[in-house]
């Protein structure tokens, strides 16, 4: 063990490794911060460079881009209401209101600290509990998946804002939009209207950008000139110790949610961030302030999405199963170098595994440094008046959206979603439930139908083991609590009205 | 101006325009390539086809003299990206990473996709992907024979995973069952579609389904790690990646060998023969490229670069075989 560690250290401690990892984190942050340029794209574009690097260096470069990219997404989410990467969609909910209040600096720092902390927890989980977590994650077949997603759907109530009914309506439309495309089991067309581009379903990035960034821009330019908000300014307040302490519970919880959600193949950062957020809201004494610029909301969301980063490597290293698209690309990098992730890697190339672990730990530190410097640089965006900033944002949105699929069709989807989003904004219909339903809808439907296909139509399969039981009970419990809280809210309101009379 | 002179001037302008266009296209063929080339990968990042396109894109520029950019245009099991290329300008700047699934299985199975299997300029097959049928080590089936016996004994209760309707994995199992004499092969096992080959392989590793038949590259790490037990491989000889797996031929079913995955480079239909020849020439040089051969083998594929006519014959034969089988299996989707 000690001998392996010292060999691994020699393998790791080269100038190239340390430098490339840094470059990776830096590039990742920049790519993540550009709307539409996702962390996935950054990793895929970096991959060919790694072909000609030594294995450890190449893989660390990719990991750097990955971690930087997921964090980088939070910067535009907070500053210009445009999530740079899908996982940052949840950060918008409280990040942008805070920036509007002139507390962008505080918000950005909170996002950075909670990201780094969650990243660190995720790394620890990866290094010490890989085998255990991986075998648990592999138990998730279609019915278990269904129970988990069903439970996750209850977070809609958590992000619906003040009006649950409007949130539910938005969620229904999200689910409806998610049904577009080819049917999974029979391959029949659903709401395609003869358009080839729709066969694969409505893509995620155009919906995301259209729903969040565009309504704000349209709203800005449809107002009278005099009513234009001047720039809010950055504010020079950082995060105080008291604030960090107040949010710490949510950061820790978010990190663990991230680890679990990351380790189960096929879920990813966005649902994890939303789940962490809604759990934080449920338990926080400041629950009413969530969605209006609550620091704890940012902490929870960012911990949730960065907690995924190390954990997606768990099934990859332990089993050779990539947890998401990004780790699938990293798997490719391993294979190009003749390495087979899985138990064999631990037997035959344990020094490489250790060297990668060392690099992963260093990447968390880099993230903190790059983020600290980056905030100072990116934050200047807040000093640009919106009338100049928004046209630039619009150009970036168009560019980013086109870059994802290289098709004008995606742009049309983006603009259409922008219009819909604008009317949702005007009529006070929250966008977050729409988005969550759109993300989780296909996962829910697929796992439901796969389960029934496996059982040949018998519903008993949904109760086949304790994992299903736990998540189904949690789902029922959540719904009961939501109903009770709403009844209480109504009573309180009624009482207040009576007193006023 | 009379209508006659008007007509003449229109014709003259048209002719001039045609001449210019003609000379441009001739110049284009001579200069080709004069700008970066886009290689469309019709499946998501990280999958076998994505890796094949990125390894090709990393070496091809040395032989063509221009950068090659990989663009993932995903959706509908490779159909979205393939349809895009088949409708693109045949100028050689938009190419497709062709795959068995999107280029032969889907066109054979699905009536509603917007291209035929030969609506492309087939530039060359580049690699083969041996198919392995495997089951989780925790399952009791030690050999293909035992597995088939179990399917026969319990018709309709066992399951297999696929990368979606119309994927190679979807056809593979009923095809194997049919060739191995299982009655009613289409419904003898339960088809559980997943989104992508990776997810389908994971389902088999976790024991959630009983069988998966897919590219060896998606399974080798699980086989080496002892999670999956390979039951059969479809190459003529045994492969180093799964030595314990007998070939279909050894098992007495050489017809199963039609089930072999491949990647190729396609262009839009009606490409200028000179441009096509340039790309084919470059591919022949890639054949001897050490780095490309190394990468391809490391990914579990077999380097297999064919020239134009051999590619056409290879694809025609495979499409013919699949069309017949799919019809016999009654698996055509209207």
Image (cartoon, coloured by chain):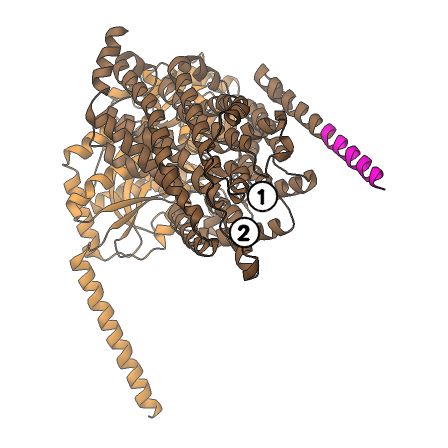
Residue A488 among those drawn in magenta: yes
Q: Is B240 on the left or on the right of B174, as rendered?
A: left
Q: Residue at x 52, y 58 (%)?
A: A221
The reply to whether callout 1 and callout 2 are in contact (CB within 8 Å) is yes
- Residue A17 in the image: state x and y as whole percent: 23, 26
Residue situated in front as seen by the camera: A11 or A101: A101
Shade representing chain B: orange
> Which x, y percent locates residue A367?
36, 29
Q: Which residue is mark 1?
A: A431
Q: Which chain is brown?
A: A
Q: Which residues are magenta?
A: A484-501
Instruction: Identify residue for label 2.
Output: A215
Question: Picture quarter containing residue A1?
Answer: top left
Q: Chain of mark 1?
A: A
- At a point 19% along the width and 49% down the height, the residue shown is B66
Spatial separation of the CA atoms under disc 1 and disc 2: 10 Å
Q: Quadrant of the C terminus of chain A?
A: top right
């Amino acid at each position: 063990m000690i001998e392996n560690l010292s060999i691994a250290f020699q393998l790791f401690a080269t100038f190239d490794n340390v430098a490339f990892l840094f470059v990776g984190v830096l590039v990742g942050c920049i790519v993540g911060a550009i709307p539409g340029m996702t962390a996935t794209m950054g990793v895929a574009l970096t991959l060919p460079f790694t072909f000609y690097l030594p294995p450890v260096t190449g893989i660390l470069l990719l990991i750097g881009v990955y971690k930087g990219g997921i964090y980088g997404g939070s910067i535009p989410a907070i500053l210009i209401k445009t999530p740079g990467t899908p996982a940052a969609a949840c950060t918008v909910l409280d990040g942008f209101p805070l920036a509007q209040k002139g507390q962008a600096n505080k918000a950005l720092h909170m996002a950075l600290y909670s990201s780094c902390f969650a990243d660190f927890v995720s790394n620890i989980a990866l290094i010490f509990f890989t085998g255990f977590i991986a075998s648990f994650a592999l138990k998730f077949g279609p019915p278990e998946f269904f129970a988990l997603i069903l439970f996750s759907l209850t977070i809609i109530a958590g992000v619906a804002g003040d009006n649950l009914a409007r949130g539910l309506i938005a969620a229904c439309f999200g689910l409806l939009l998610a049904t577009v495309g080819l049917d999974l089991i029979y391959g029949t067309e659903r709401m395609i209207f003869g358009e080839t581009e729709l066969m694969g379903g409505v893509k995620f990035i155009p919906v995301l950008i259209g729903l969040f960034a565009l309504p704000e821009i349209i709203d800005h330019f449809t107002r009278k000139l005099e009513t234009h908000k001047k720039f809010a300014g950055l504010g020079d307040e950082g995060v105080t110790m008291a604030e960090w302490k107040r949010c710490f519970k949510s950061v820790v919880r978010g990190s663990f949610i991230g680890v679990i959600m990351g380790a189960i193949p096929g879920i990813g950062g966005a649902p994890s961030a939303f789940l962490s957020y809604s759990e934080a809201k449920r338990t926080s004494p400041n629950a009413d302030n969530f969605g209006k610029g609550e620091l704890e909301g940012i902490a929870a969301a960012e911990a949730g999405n960065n907690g995924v980063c190390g954990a997606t490597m768990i099934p990859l290293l332990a089993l050779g199963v990539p947890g998401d698209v990004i780790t699938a690309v990293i798997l490719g990098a391993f294979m190009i170098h003749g390495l087979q992730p899985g138990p064999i890697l631990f037997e035959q190339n344990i020094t490489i595994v250790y060297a990668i672990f060392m690099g992963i730990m260093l990447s968390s530190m880099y993230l903190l440094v790059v983020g600290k410097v980056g905030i100072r640089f990116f934050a200047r965006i807040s000093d640009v008046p919106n009338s100049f900033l928004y046209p630039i944002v619009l150009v970036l949105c168009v560019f980013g959206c086109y870059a994802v699929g290289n098709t004008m069709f995606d742009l049309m989807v983006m603009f259409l979603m922008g219009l819909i989003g604008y009317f949702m904004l005007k009529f006070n219909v929250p966008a977050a439930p729409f988005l969550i339903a759109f993300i989780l809808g296909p996962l829910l439907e697929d796992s439901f139908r796969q389960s029934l296909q496996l059982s040949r139509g018998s519903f008993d399969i949904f109760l086949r083991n304790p994992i299903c039981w736990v998540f189904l009970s949690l789902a029922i419990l959540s719904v009961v609590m939501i109903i009770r809280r709403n009844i209480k809210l109504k009573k309180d309101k009624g009482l207040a009205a009576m007193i006023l009379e | 101006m009379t209508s006659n002179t008007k007509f003449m001037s229109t014709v003259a302008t048209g002719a001039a325009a045609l001449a210019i266009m003609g000379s441009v296209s001739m110049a284009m063929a001579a200069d080709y390539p004069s700008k970066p080339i886009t290689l469309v990968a019709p499946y998501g990042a990280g999958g076998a086809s994505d890796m094949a396109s990125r390894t090709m894109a990393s070496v091809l520029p040395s032989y063509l003299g221009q950068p090659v950019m990989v663009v993932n245009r995903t959706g509908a099991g490779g159909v979205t990206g393939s349809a895009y290329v088949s409708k693109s300008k045949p100028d050689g700047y938009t190419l497709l990473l062709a795959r068995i699934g999107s280029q032969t299985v889907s066109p054979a199975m699905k009536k509603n996709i917007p291209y035929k299997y030969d609506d492309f300029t087939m530039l060359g097959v580049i690699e083969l992907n041996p198919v392995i049928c495997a089951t989780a080590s925790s399952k009791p089936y030690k050999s293909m024979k035992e597995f088939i016996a179990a399917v026969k004994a319990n018709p309709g209760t066992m399951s297999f995973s696929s990368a979606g309707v119309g994927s190679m994995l979807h056809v593979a199992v009923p095809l194997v069952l049919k060739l191995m004499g299982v009655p009613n092969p289409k419904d003898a096992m339960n088809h559980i579609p997943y989104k992508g080959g990776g997810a389908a392989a994971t389902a088999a590793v976790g024991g959630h389904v009983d069988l998966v038949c897919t590219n060896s590259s998606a399974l080798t790490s699980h086989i080496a790690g002892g999670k999956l037990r390979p039951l059969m491989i479809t190459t003529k000889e045994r492969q180093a990646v799964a030595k314990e797996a007998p070939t279909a031929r050894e098992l007495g079913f050489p017809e199963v060998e039609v089930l072999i995955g491949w990647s190729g480079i396609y262009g839009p239909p009606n490409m200028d023969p000179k441009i096509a020849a340039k790309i084919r020439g470059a591919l022949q040089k890639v054949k001897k490229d050490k780095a490309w051969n190394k990468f391809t083998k490391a990914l579990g594929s077999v380097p297999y670069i064919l020239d134009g006519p051999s590619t056409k014959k290879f694809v025609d034969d495979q499409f013919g075989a699949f069309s017949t089988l799919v019809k016999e299996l009654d698996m055509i989707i209207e």
